């Protein structure tokens, strides 16, 4: 059984754990460096990116997670997690993990009141469209050659990407009952989903 850790310093980690358990994997919160050992994958949840980044520094998790990412470890980041995985972030007063070769804009759609929901075509998970929840969401401004855009808004804005075994989503799949994106990530963890 796969062991998936969910960074549990701030944000929507409980919801990720619940969805993963529905998929039959061992999922648990990660707050300490030693809890990163013996994991098969890690999820960095949505929340407040500056706060999560600062707490990762305080709990001495930033460098160990950066090292795991550099070794090709499976990591999924949602909303704030996408921001932290990026190489460069516009509007963040903290150095991100730099794990994915992409530039991301924080709070790209506006404030909390500008949050929205929409149905997305995401070819890697098939039909029907995925009902996505965007809350003070980022978007992708630039990607490098090794990054594949998985989903775009109708205007072409990139809001989901993959690089190697890392997946970044601008929205919150953990706030829906749709298990397909978590299943997709587990497929990457297991080696069932090729590039």
Image (cartoon, rainbow, N blue to C red):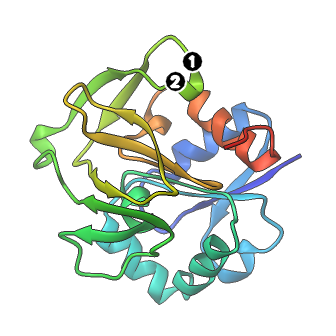
Q: Position of residue 31 (x, y in %)?
A: 60, 73
Tag 2 secondary structure: helix
Q: Say whether residue 122 is left or right of residue 41.
A: left
Please name whichever residue, 71 or 181, is drawn nearer the observer in this view of the structure: 71
Please name whichever residue, 32 or 75, is drawn nearer the observer in this view of the structure: 75
> Which residue is drawn at the image coordinates 48% and 69% (left, top)?
9
Which residue carries the number 1 mark? 126
Q: Quadrant of the C terminus?
A: top right
Q: Position of residue 131 (x, y in %)?
A: 39, 22
Q: Position of residue 168 (x, y in %)?
A: 47, 51
Looking at the picture, does residue 32 appear above or below residue 72?
Answer: below
Tag 1 secondary structure: loop
Which residue carries the number 2 mark? 123
Q: Is residue 2 visible?
A: yes
Could you say which quadrant of the image residue 163 lies in? bottom right
Q: Is residue 179 visible?
A: no
Q: Position of residue 170 (x, y in %)?
A: 36, 46
> Which residue is drawn at the image coordinates 54% and 49% (left, top)?
14
Q: Say whether residue 127 is left or right of residue 132.
A: right
Could you say which quadrant of the image residue 25 lies in? top right
């Amino acid at each position: 059984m796969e062991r998936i850790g969910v960074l549990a310093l701030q944000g929507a980690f409980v919801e990720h754990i619940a969805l993963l358990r529905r998929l039959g994997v061992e999922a648990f919160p990660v707050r300490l460096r030693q809890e990163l050992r013996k994991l098969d994958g890690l999820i960095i949840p949505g929340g407040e990116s500056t706060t999560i980044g600062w707490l990762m520094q305080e709990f001495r998790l930033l460098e160990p997670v950066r090292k795991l990412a550099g070794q090709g470890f499976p990591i999924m980041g949602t909303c704030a997690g996408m921001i932290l995985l990026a190489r460069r972030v516009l509007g963040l007063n903290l150095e991100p993990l730099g794990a994915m070769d992409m530039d991301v804009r924080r709070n790209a759609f506006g404030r909390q009141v500008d949050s929205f929901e929409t149905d997305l075509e995401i070819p890697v998970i098939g039909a029907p469209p995925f009902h996505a929840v965007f809350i003070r969401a980022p978007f992708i401004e630039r990607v490098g050659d090794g990054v594949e855009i998985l989903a775009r808004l109708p205007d072409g804005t990139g809001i989901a990407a993959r690089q190697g075994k890392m997946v970044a989503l601008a929205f919150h799949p953990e706030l829906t009952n749709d298990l397909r994106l978590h299943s997709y990530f587990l497929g990457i963890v297991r080696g069932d989903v090729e590039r």
